[in-house]
Image: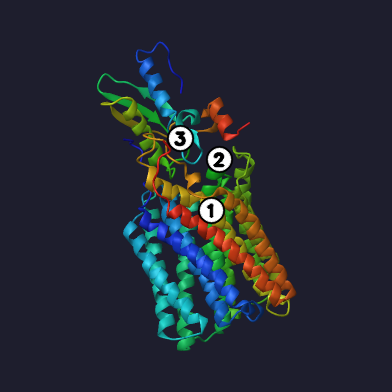
Amino acid sequence: MNIDLTHTHVNEVMQAQNALYNVIDPELFVNVVDLGLIYHIEFPPDDHIRVTMTLSTPHCPMGEAITTGVKNALEASFPGKVIDIQLTFDPPWSFERLTAEGRQQLGVK
Amino acid sequence: MADVNIAKAPANDAVLPFYATGALAFLALCVLLLVSPQSLQTHFFNPHLLSIVHTAALGWGTMVIFGAAHQLLPVICEQDLYSERMASFCWYTLTTGIALFVFSFWDMRTGWLMITGGALVVLSVLLFVINVLLTSRICTRYSVQKMLIVSSSLWLLFTVVVGLLLAVNLAFPFFTRSHLDILKLHAHAGIAGWFLQLITGVSAKLVPMFLLGKAGEEKWLKYACLFQNAGLLLFLADGYLNGVGDRSLLYGALILAGVLCWMRYLWTAYKSRLRKKVDVMMKHTAFSFCCLLIAFALLPWVLYAQGSRWAMLYGSFIFLGWITGIILGKSFKTLPFIVWNGHYKHLSGKVKVPLPKHLYNERMVEWQLPAFVVALFSLALALILDNLLLIRLSLVSWLIVALLYNINVFKTLLHKTKTLE
């Protein structure tokens, strides 16, 4: 996920990203940010946070646990906000979405 | 939340009792073998061996596969399981049916007890097939994996119905064909129809997922499905009409071609895997595939060599090598995640929680693989040498494998929720 430093909500987006580092994919043991599962984090004018994300496999058996983890982490970091998760497989997740840290944690050369 | 459906995992009581019972059946299987090792030195149609084989095929293999299938059908079909209640209910009928069946075979108590056991197994399979068909019917798209799961479940139904007829025939003879010939057809419908096609379909989905590799070209999976079914259908038709004979090798070769196509499909996932280090669970799987190929290689000896030892060796590589190997490995690729989901899904992201790999003893799974390899090859050697003492010794090592597996399965199942901070 790339963060636009000129964005109005850059601080909130970075805070959200930091919170999501605590959400671990239970199968791969890597957090959802370094796995590249998070596509966008938006702060619309209302009390919502909109997260557009994907899963490493469509209908991943741990999908519900991962999306619940994202919701829980953001609710803890932004009390009172309503978290909307938009799950998408367009574009689908691929290995190229891993960050350098994610690659290292997975042992990928 | 999302406008994309992420299939929900079924409730744990549709899955976990099958794993627990399957693990206990594996232990019971090893104990029964140890109690009656001489049954491995006689003709395969003997009461103790029939009891042992049904403990392996139904109590161990089918029981664990039912549990795993209830969990994985939503993943493969990308839809929720059609009926969790039906899935939970069939545990009761399957467990009772197998218990009656195995008990009746031990002393060859033919009659209504055995027939009732068989009928309960048929009822359980019927419920399973309905669940598979109705879950896959609502699939949004066609896939060969789905077709293999459906065909395997239909082959299972065929197998258990023929099994029930065999049980009836023992008490009230009505077959116009040889009982032993029909028994061979029944056994191979189960092996090449149920187990092979189910494992082919499920592994085609799971192996690329576990290795983080690319799925192979779908044409290989289509060929696998075609050859496996064609070989089996020809074997059954010819076997029924003309008896099991020389042409069985030809049909075996067709099924083998289907197996090789399936392995070619998986090879792509292995070659393109992101995780270069292959974990011990996947090594179990790779070893189990070798056992299947060894079983195929033994077919000429089973058909033409004198005595029963080659048939015993063939059966051992199928049930104790291939099917057991794949379950020993895949159990710890699925069960800890299922249990973890029940304990921690709602806590994820709130507090630090253990990972699924912390729910079982990883070291013990590492010991399990060499123990399993030693147990299998020592039994194979003992069978080739036809030596009762060596058979007994190898069966002790099987008991050790079963204990290691059971301790770890029940450690996972009995896990209590805890946080790390």
* Measured Cα–Cα span from mark 3 to mark 1: 22 Å
- Residue for point 56% across, 25% down: A100
Quadrant of the frame with the C terminus of chain B: top left
Q: Nearer the viewer, mark 2 or mark 1?
A: 1
Check residue A12 in the rendering and tell me which mark sits there, or answer none: none
**Rendering coords of residue B281 (x, y %):** 58, 50
Residues beneath discs 3 and 2 located on the same chain: no
- Neighbour class for label 3 at 10 Å: few (<14), some, many (≥20)? many
The residue beneath circle 1 is B330
Per the image, label 3 sits on a secondary structure element best described as: strand
**What amino acid type should be assigned to the residue bearing mark 3?**
Ile
Letter of the chain that mark 3 sits on in the rendering: A
Residues beneath discs 3 and 1 located on the same chain: no
Do the CB atoms of the residues marked 2 and 1 lie less than 8 Å apart?
no
Asked if B21 appears above or below A37 in the picture, the reply is below
The residue beneath circle 3 is A24
**Rendering coords of residue B279 (x, y %):** 60, 46
Total numbered circles: 3
- Residue for point 39% across, 34% down: B349
The residue beneath circle 2 is B212
Q: Nearer the viewer, mark 3 or mark 1?
A: 3
Letter of the chain that mark 1 sits on in the rendering: B
Letter of the chain that mark 2 sits on in the rendering: B
